[in-house]
Image: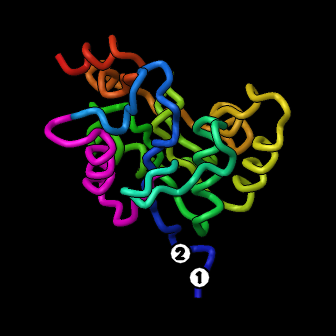
Amino acid sequence: MDTATDPMPRIGVVLAGGLSSRMGRDKAMLPWQGRPLIEHQIATLHAVGLDTVHVSGERPDYHGIADSIAHAGPLGGIAGIAAACADAELLIVPVDMPRLQPALLQRLLTTTTPVGSTHFAGHVLPMRLRLDAHCRAALIELMAADNERARSLRALQERVGASALPLQANEETQLVDCNTEQTWHEVCE
């Protein structure tokens, strides 16, 4: 039987449900170090010590969990994961940050904060998110918003509370996301 003192399960999440419209091709399938980027991100989360890793988005080859509302951005992906999972600590990474290292993610996962989400200063992702009743209520409220701009990760962080961890200058380079061909080529150099 679970008690209030039992730790929540820790689950990794790779956000891979986007349209990749700025890239012009599927970012998840971009080749990175000899395999698709999505596989690299899954392996990175496993290297952090997470036994369970879920992929958000219509990804049958990766047992992807469909977004709760199609084309609702990262929040739709998180809402889809929330509908499929029990309460847990989620470690959420975007598929398009190939330079992420397990040590940086481990710090995000293990830093104790009293709020519902933790991220690095100046960046919304990656993020640790406490998936509990409060978070689920916030997701439902935000997903029901008429204004698409209201459905943002920042809005979710504001609702559940957020703590921003400082970054060292050498860590900042790990958080480059590859949304365009230009950025992808720069990261690959």
Q: Which residue is mark 2?
A: 6
- Identify which residue is drawn at 31% across, 28% down: 174
Categorize mark 1 by other alpha carbons within 10 Å: few (<14), some (14-19), many (20+).
few
Query: SS of the residue at dot 1?
Result: loop
- Residues rendered magenta in the picture: 32-56
Residue 9 percent coordinates (x, y)? 48, 68
Q: Is residue 83 above or below residue 166?
A: below
Decide: marks 2, 1 in contact (CB < 8 A)? yes
Q: Is residue 12 above or below residue 101?
A: below
- Identify which residue is drawn at 42% across, 50% down: 109
- Identify which residue is drawn at 59% across, 48% down: 78
Of the 4 image quadrants, the one containing the C terminus is top left
Q: Which residue is mark 1?
A: 2
Q: Quadrant of residue 152?
A: top right
Q: Nearer the viewer, residue 116 or 82?
A: 82
Task: Kindly identify the amino acid type of the residue bearing the numbered disc 2.
Answer: Asp
Residue 95 percent coordinates (x, y)? 39, 38
Side of 111 relative to 47 (left or right): right
Q: Quadrant of residue 101?
A: top left
